[in-house]
Amino acid sequence: MTDIDLETLAVRIRQSLGCSKDLAADYAKGISNPPEIIHGKILVRDAEGRIVARVPDSVLA
């Protein structure tokens, strides 16, 4: 992943999706390094590796 810290990434996810601060922080932690991007969406996975969300790849820009 680029030099984006988790807090900045969470803010960008929150702005993009309009979700809560806690959910955005969880999503930021679930993005792998390097991020898995499919069709312009970043896959967010839980601890077991299941996809729990897809967020726009623009949050990395």
Image: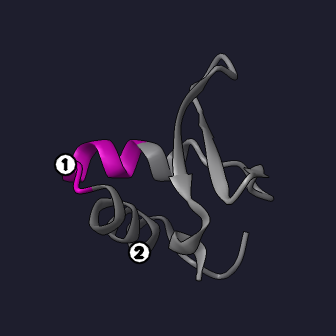
**Amino acid type, mark 1:** Ser
Left or right: where does residue 44 sit relative to residue 15?
right
Placement of 58 over or under 32, stated as above or below: below
Placement of 51 over or under 60, stated as above or below: above
Placement of 28 over or under 3, stated as above or below: above
The one of 21 and 56 positioned closer to us in this rendering: 56
Position of residue 52 measured from the top left corner of the image (x, y, whole percent): 52, 27
Which residue is labeled 1 in the image?
Answer: 20
Q: In which quarter of the image is residue 16?
A: bottom left
- Report crowding for label 2: few under 14, some 14 to 19, many 20 or more residues within 10 A (C-alpha): some
Residue in the image at 69% along x and 22% along y: 49
**SS assignment at label 2:** helix
Q: Does the magenta stretch include residue 23?
A: yes
**SS assignment at label 1:** loop
User: Magenta segment, which residues?
Assistant: 18-26
Q: Does the magenta stretch include residue 48?
A: no
The span from disc 1 to disc 2 (Cα, nearest Å) is 14 Å
Position of residue 31 measured from the top left corner of the image (x, y, whole percent): 62, 49
Is the stretch drawn in magenta largely helix, strand or loop? helix
Residue in the image at 36% along x and 51% along y: 25
**Amino acid type, mark 2:** Thr
Disc sitting over residue 8 in the figure: 2
- Report crowding for label 1: few under 14, some 14 to 19, many 20 or more residues within 10 A (C-alpha): few
Position of residue 27 measured from the top left corner of the image (x, y, whole percent): 45, 45
